[in-house]
Image: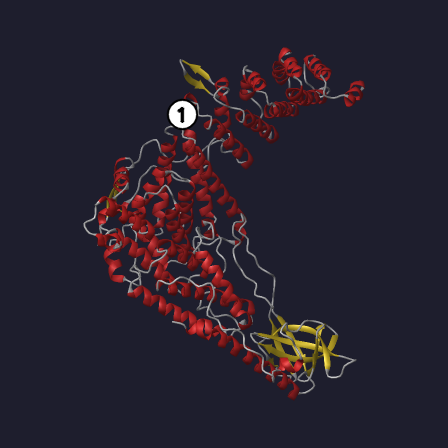
Amino acid sequence: MWYSFWRSRDRFTLDALRYFTDQLMKIQVVNDVNKAFVIEALRSIAELVTYGDQHDTDFFEFFMEKQVMGEFVRILKINKNVIVSVQLLQTMSIMIQNLKSDQSIYYLFSNEHINFLITYSFDFRNEELLSYYISFLRAISGKLNKNTISLFVKTEKEDIVAFPLYVEAIRFAFHEEGMIRTAVRALTLNIYHVGDTYVNQYIASTPHDDYFLNLVKFFIEHCISLNGMVSPMTEIQRPESTSSMLSAVDEIEDSLYYLNDVVSAGIPDVGMLITDSMLKLFIFPMLLPSLRIGVSDGKKFTSVISLYILCSVLRILKVKDLVNTVAAALICSIESFLPTFEAKFNGLREDHDETHVESHVDDENLSGNLNLSSMIVSSPSLSTSSSVLHNCCGSASVLRDALITYITSGDDTQVVGSLNVLITFLQTKELDESMLDALGILPQRKQHKKLLLKALVGEDTGDEQLFALENCSSEDGRDGELSIYLQRLKDQYEVSCSYQEVGEGPHMHRFLVLDALISLFCRTDISADTLWDGGWLLRQLLPYSETEFNTCHVQSLKVSFKECCSQLAQEQSGSWPDLLIQVICDEWRKCKRAIEASSPRKEPKSMLFPTKKFSSSDVIPIESSLAAGERMYERVKVFVLLHQLQIFSAGRSLPDQLPILIPAGFPETSRAKSAGLTIIGPKPGTELNLVDSVPCRIAFERGKERHFNFLAISMGTSGWIILAEESLQKPCCGIVRVVAPLAGCNQKIDEVHSRWLHLRIRPSTLPLFETVNNTPNLKLKSKSLVDGRWILAFRDEAACKSALTMIHEEIVFLRSEVERRLKHLISED
């Protein structure tokens, strides 16, 4: 009690440190009586030593003189209380993290006390204790360098035989708690980045290299888990599983980023081990066979999941050998697979503790036993060039053709997935240009650069080949490293492959991709967002020239564009004509910006969370103005894309503005003029003339009927239904009380009561349903807006019909103005 009073007056003194140290030395057993003081002593010593390290060297000299570290170890040995062990680990973590002096850190690490704490048998069934233990290990790793790391290893004849810090940490690498896994990964990266040669040799030696193999298995397990969350019938997520899918996606991508960080550390043999494990355990036996079309038996993943995972692996795991090997496998005709891979890769373990990852994958499936028939792809002829595709894809044994087929005939998610795979290859810097050429996605500017270099060094026989892409022979596709990776597939991975020489070689492959994209733009069952992704890819391949568009391509785009114009003309008479021009102008700018951007709008994981889409052939219920608005929005997005492709295919640059006519003046005889409205339009509280109004009654609340004057007014491309109250001061004038959109009101006289007029009141703005970009939760933005229903009661049948006629006439004026302003745009060839 007396010390507590004294301590509060002067806390950070050497006497305080001496007091706590002396009292701690007197402790012979830790029990319930003194454990509170032991905890306080440990906490205070950590604070005092940290303070002294930064302000007074006498503190740490006293700490060394009294060998307080030895006292910590002694207290741990005589302790039976978990809470004391927790405080001791926290004390050590605080000291290690906050000590700035290299001398102080070196002293802490230079005796066996730290290693004793690392290897001590704590009761890790206590989650709090485990958490502090891992934090303690991570704190140590944060102070490691080439001088201090040697203090944590045991050597014999210059070879490291034990590294307790590393070995104990990776025991918990696959713990069920994510925070613990993250801490262990940070610890291991700290060790890898030290760059000690002998430590790296120890890490890459047997059996410690099993850790990297288990990382790959852990990644595979989460891929299988994600696949199980997707409906095998629809290949879209169940609504209740979205949260679980997001967690699984995060875990998959975190694992890949960690693997990439491990490879980037540059430890000899580790990068090759991870690459081999990914290829032999996962990509060859499980992932690539799942790209097959029309085959369900034996597939480990749905097509969407396999496409997403392939994108993620290529995008995140930036390993040159891995990326180029996968590309080589996609462009080869797979002839046969030898029955087994290396015996070391013998599948996932069924039984495990917290140091290993659980798996439901059969050992046989991960042993490398691949069936040739499982790699066969059935690729139907594409609509735009069936004869060429029949010759190229007749055998249907090239996995690249599966991607093409998904684009031309797959559903929306399959199209998005295939486009993302091609986009990922295109954006992968580690991929050799010869691979891009063989995949058919080498950008035109890179082809020109390639031919220019050939011309400069004298490899071409004629100057005309400089810009004649069609003369790029099949040997060009085998330039660079393509032949090297083909041979590596055979020698290193025991996969026998041969490059399929077809027609004019890489130019034909490029034509297949271009043909598939044109076919995609002609489809009416694909969402506009997906078509925009295809437009982005096309602009990357052909940024400034129309030379590769043939007559069939141009004609197909013209036909699709005319059909889209016809559909857009229908929207002029739909529920949202007043917003049509605004939406067209906005989406034109967005589309131009999207397809000219340096990267796609969305991340590959967006394919797992598709938004609800409307195709041009959908039948929209007349009761739903919101559904009609979504359809209009989709049609506009498709229209602006096809319009821009029309301009692009003709070799012209995209204009910033569309050829939309300016608004016309208001006729003097219009109801808007008679009502005295300004160009701003009616607002609640605005005064207007009631010369053309019709008296009516309406109840917005049960039992509260109100009297208004009804008006339907249009001004240019805008129109309103107005309910106004008569002004007591000014005759024939009124005050606007309620304003609603005129378009889409679906006016109808009641079949029983001829004095009643039914109106549907749609929202004044169009709520857009788009996936939020660059957000981890991928939630949908949507406003909870619904259609309203009004029943207006007039004094007689003639008044009701007069109101109906007024609405009809004003809607005709509104639609006519929209048609006039869009006439040149929609009729433009």
Mark 1 falls on what kind of element?
A: loop
Looking at the rendering, in which quadrant would you find the C terminus?
bottom left
* Extreme residue toward the left, this view: 461
Q: Circle 1 is placed at which residue position?
A: 207
Number of disc labels: 1
Question: Which is nearer the eye, 374 or 7?
Answer: 7
Q: Is residue 195 above or below residue 493?
A: above
Residue 641 in sight in this render: yes
Q: Amino acid at mark 1?
A: Pro
Quarter of the view holding residue 82: top right
Residue 378 visible at all = no
Residue at 48%, 61% (x, y): give it. 589
* Residue at 38 percent of width and 49 percent of height: 421
Residue 273 pos. (x, y %):
37, 32
Q: Nearer the viewer, residue 446 or 772?
A: 446
Residue 110, position in %: x, y? 54, 15
Left or right, 641 with respect to 5, comes to left
List x then y, in percent, for residue 745.
59, 75
Q: Where does the image place residue 662, in percent across and percent down from the top left?
A: 52, 73
Which residue lies at the image location 52% right of the left edge and 70% below the top edge?
580
